[in-house]
Image (cartoon, rainbow, N blue to C red):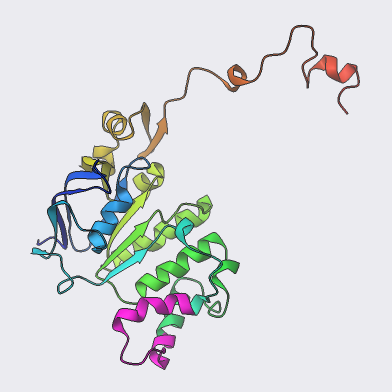
Amino acid sequence: MQPLIELNHVTFGYGAAPVVEDVSLHLHPGQFAALVGPSGAGKTTLLRLILGTLQPVRGEVCIHGQVLSRRNAPQIGYVPQLETVDWNFPVTVEQVVLMGRVRKAGVWPWASAEDRRRVRETLERLDLGGLEGRHIRDLSGGQQQRVFLARALIAAPDLLLLDEPTTGVDMRTAENILHMLADLNQGGMTILITTHDLNAAAAHLPWLVCLNRRIIAQGAPEDVLRADILNQTYQGDMIVLQQDGMLFVQQKPHHHSYRDILPQPIPGEVPPGSEEARSDGLLD
């Protein structure tokens, strides 16, 4: 099968040091994959190279076998990290979602009745019906994330890119977002996300790419979520456990406890919280 997106020996840097180096990656139609790695590993940069907002210093990004350009660029839906959004900008939910229709807009600058109908349908699909007139800053983190997902989906993209879609939301909302993405993928959409949550990735993603400037490993979770690969990716000691067919990843705990880092009492001084402090009436 012809890959939808190919990165062939791609290197990019904002200065002298490369942020990503000699990266080769294929993303096939209908694939659901995640880029995992530490902060500064180049995950967001890789998404921007696929979007075409950054150009490789070396190597090439291809779409359907042709070097990516404005002429052959696929319709890509992009959901940024929530922390990069200016929540003080006065914009409603409907206006945010309509931004996703810009490339398909006609000669008129205003939204058509059909555009507004599609907005309502997309919001209903994401359990956001009735929020069209709400200011984006008045929504919960999970609702905000789904609004930006609606903005990406309304243009019916060939490829959906999401940068840390579960960051800043509670565990239940994160699970709902990943289930929603899995449903979209089951419908045929190609999806690539970045995430720091290795346990969620292990539970929901069929393909993982471990990245730290270079691709360390890629494959199914059970093949790449191994201590040796994760230690190389994160430059630290990692533990991988398996129980009831599920993988769990945890950084190896330090040998000291929290008591080891608490300030030590001065000799002769009554430690706060001790029985002596209570008997002396130092504590209520």
Residue at x 47%, y 54% (from the top left corner): 174
Note whether 50 is above or below 129 in the view shown.
above
Q: Position of residue 261 (x, y in %)?
A: 59, 20
168 or 175: which is nearer to us? 168
Quadrant in which the N terminus is drawn: bottom left
107 or 133: which is nearer to us? 107
Q: Is residue 85 magenta?
A: no
Q: Position of residue 179 (x, y in %)?
A: 40, 59
**Side of 186 relative to 275 (left or right):** left
Quadrant in which the C terminus is drawn: top right
Q: Position of residue 76 (x, y in %)?
A: 27, 68
Q: Is residue 112 magenta?
A: yes
85 or 25: which is nearer to us? 85
Q: Is residue 219 visible?
A: no
Q: Quadrant of residue 252?
A: top left
Q: Position of residue 259 (x, y in %)?
A: 62, 19
Note whether 213 is above or below 167 in the view shown.
above
Q: Is residue 93 visible?
A: yes
Residue at x 46%, y 24% (from the top left corner): 253
Residue at x 33%, y 30% (from the top left corner): 235
Q: Quadrant of residue 270?
A: top right
Question: Main SS type for the magenta part?
Answer: helix
Magenta highlight range: 95-117
Q: Quadrant of residue 7?
A: bottom left
Residue at x 45%, y 58% (from the top left corner): 84
